[in-house]
Structures are given as structure tokens and as C-alpha cells.
Amino acid sequence: MQEVMVKRASELMKDGTVSRVLGWKNGEFVYDPTPAVFESAEALSAFVYNDFCASNLSKYLIALSKKNGKTLVFLKPCDSYSFNQLLTEHRIDREKIYIIGLECSGKVDEAKLREAGCEGILSVKTEGEDIVVDTLYGEKTLPKADCLGERCITCKSRKVVAFDEMIGENGEVNSECGRFDQVAALEAMTPDERYEFWRGELSRCIRCNACRNICPACSCENCVFDNPKSGISQKAAADTFEENMFHIIRAFHVAGRCTDCGECSRVCPQQIPLHLLNRKFIKDMNECYGEYQAGAEAGSRAPLVNYTLDDCEPSVVYEREASK
Amino acid sequence: MQINNEFKPKIVAFCCNWCSYAGADLAGTNRANYPADVKIIRVPCSCRVNPMFILRAFQRGADGVILCGCHPGDCHYTTGNYYARRRMTMLFSMLSYLGIEKERTRVEWVSAAEGAKFAATMNEFVETITNLGENKRLEDLRCKK
């Protein structure tokens, strides 16, 4: 796939359609490719695309669409939802972006490869249902389904929703993905159990802000958490309250705009399941205000910037609890 | 000397300027009783209340937070309370999801003519919070004296 992508990118660059390419290059290790901008056809020799290229490129387009000339970008299905969401919020100039949609069968989580005993990873290749991992100590074949990241296991959609052309086949929305199962399991617990669960998770937070910085929905130029007067800017949480507050507010600020791309959980160095907070909001909004998928179409109105005259009252939260 | 250990909750009530604040005023002029534990904060509209305000109130020592606004349909700014209703539903649901007692937060619609309802709501809310006890799950130890 990488060769096809580089070939098409250099064609578009040479005929002057685009003046730069946003893609991935190798990071420090083979399993952490980093987003990169390529300004010339020659520079594309450093372009990589493999099963580790998980990062969502849509957020970088905010800055790139302010530059002169068109930018070519490769978007996986989940990235295209974020792209549409940013278009809805007028953060990206669609005219300045040329999108090549990518067929995606899920991205590999390096931590899972380690669990399966792969050390010194050199490369990884999809072969049908399996992946072949080449390591310093020889090759290993693993079933791909066991090595996918959390968000890919419960993949909501393989459909690229915004593209100018596709590489590979466009997939389908999977409404039976079961992405709310974990949320439902938590809801079924008693409040005390839930409190214990979240204390255990959130107390690991080191406030590195990686979840905020990676999030395509968190694209404010001035973030509330960078306000020195907020009392919690640029420092580790000193108290359980701050841990709770940071995570509640972070999830609330993206509520209705979160496309559930799962980047926050992927980048968290402490493995906090942040997607469970985002999915809770998505699940609640689906239940209370009708099914809504942020980014499914550009220009749609999110539930929290909308209303109907006969919305449920906030007390519905207590009634739902009581009915369990 | 005797030490008084009786628990008196701190309640923060966000009241919209046009309905609930006037409702609280009416409760006063009608001499309806409600506990002095309720501290009223006047806001221009119920949708002025950012979720952060509610968390901040808990941080600074509130044991319960109640938001009062005009009845849906009666908003001075036409639609403010419709947005507040959705926001607060989502926030309360999230607080409950994190295991924080759901009884500590409430939304009540009180019009300017409902002085008696204001007093009754506050009496009931203060009683609920008194029975629940101190806010431990959303407290900030640094803010405790």
C-alpha cells in the first residue's frame, strides 16, 4: 500500500495539484511512526505507511490549510470523521485540502505485540487475517484480531466519509460494533464500585495533556486548562478533585463533537481508558436526544448546541439509576 | 466546653435573574422559611452556568449544588434554559457515572411567582444533603480550613 500511496502522492505533487503531503515518517522506533509534512516529491522517500500508522492526521490540517497551496492528506475512516467535524466547526478550508481515503482493517497496538512476546520489532505486515511480525529474534505470525488497539476492536465504521479519491475499497458503517458494552457494564455497577473504579484509573493521571493535545476536537487556540487563573494549568494534579475535574471538563468540552476516534486512549502514557468517558457522553446523547454520530456528515448540528421543546428533564438521570 | 458536631451543609444555588432569583425574593417577602445554608448566586440565565461552575462550587466546599431557572418556554432569552437542560442532564449523568452521589446536584424550574415552591425546594434539598453528609468525593483538601 505504501508504494501506491507514494506513487500517487508524487504524481499529484508533480502535476501541481498539491504543494505538500501530510503523511507519516518513521519515528524513533519502527512502531511509532510520526506525522510528517513532505514539501517535495524527493522528500517522499521518507514516507512510511504500515500497521503502526495509527495517528489521526486531521488536526494538523487546521494549521496546514492556512498555508498557500493545497495539502494532500491520507485519511483513514476514523480520521475522516474528525475531518468532517473540523469542517463543521469551520476550522479547515476544504478547498485547500486534497484527501486520499485509505481502506483500513485496524491498526496494531504495539503493547499487545509485546504481551504476545515480540521484542525488538523490526517490521509488521498484514497477511490476510494474520500479521507477520519481523523481530530481531526471528519472525512471528499472530492473528491480527488479537493485536488491534482497543478502538479498532470496537471499530464503529470502516467508511471514509470525506475523500477526493480512495485507495482500496471503501468500507461500511458497523452499527453492531459493541463499543458501548464497557460503558454499560460500568453503569450496571453500584456508585461505590464506579467511584473505586474511576479513582483507580484517574489517580494515575500525570496531567501530561497528551489526550488534549492529540484530540482533533480539542482545537481551541486558548485552552481553559492553559489559563493560569484556572489553578490547574501546566502542573500535575495535586488533589483527587483536580483529577476528576480535568477529566470531566475535558470530556464535556468535546461532548457532541467527539467522533470517538480513540486517539486519547491510544496516546495516554498511563493507559487511562479515556474513551469510556467520551463514549458515556455519546451513549447518553444517543439515548436522550436521538442517534447522532459526530462527523458523519459535515454541517450537522451537535446535540449540545441544539434543543427540542420536549427534551427529558435532568432528573431522568436519577430515574434511570433507580430503575436498575 | 461543649463541641457542636452538628453537620450543617453548604448549598450553592445558582438562580437565574429573571425567574428564580425573583422567586427567592418572593419567598422572602412572603416570609416563607428556608434554611440559611443555601447561598444564592445570581446568574443572568440558567445557561450561563458552565459545568465548571458546579465543579468549582464543590471544590470550594459546597455539599450540594442546585440550579434554578425559568420554566422551559419562559426563558427571558427565549431558549437559554433549553440548552442548560441538555447540558446539565449530560453533566449529572457523568457525575453519577464517576460514582459521585447523584443527589448532590439538581435542576429545578422556579418562576418569579413561585416563592412557595422555592422555599419548599430548598427545604427538601437541604434535608437531602444533610442526610447524605459531607461531600467527600468531590472535595479539594486544600480548600478545607
Image (spheres, rainbow, N blue to C red):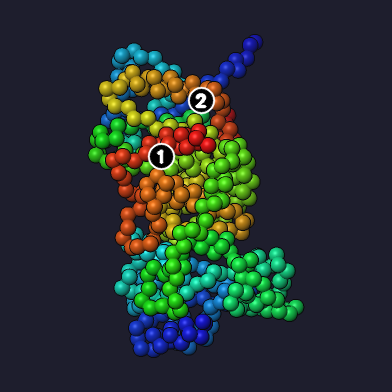
Residue at the extreme top: B1
Q: Position of residue B108 (x, y in %)?
A: 37, 30
Q: Chain of mark 2?
A: B
Which one is in front, B10 or A293? A293
Q: Amino acid at mark 1?
A: Met
Q: Is residue A298 above or below residue A228?
A: below
Q: Chain of mark 1?
A: B
How far, Cα to Cα, is label 1 from label 2? 19 Å
Label 2 belongs to which residue?
A: B129
Q: Residue sitting at 33 percent across and 32 percent down?
A: B69
Q: Amino acid at mark 2?
A: Ile
Q: Position of residue B53 (x, y in %)?
A: 43, 38
Q: Residue sitting at 62 percent across and 40 percent down?
A: A193
What crowding class fits label 1: few (fewer than 14 Cα within 10 Å), some (14-19), or many (20 or more)?
many
Provide the secondary structure element on which disc 1 rests.
helix
Q: Residue sitting at 75 percent across and 78 percent down?
A: A137
Relative to A256, A111 lies left or right: right
Q: Position of residue A216 (x, y in %)?
A: 44, 61
Tell me whether marks 1 and 2 sit on the same chain: yes
Label 1 belongs to which residue?
A: B88
Q: Position of residue B130 (x, y in %)?
A: 52, 22
Asked which quadrant contains residue A115, the reply is bottom right
Report whether residue A53 is seen: yes
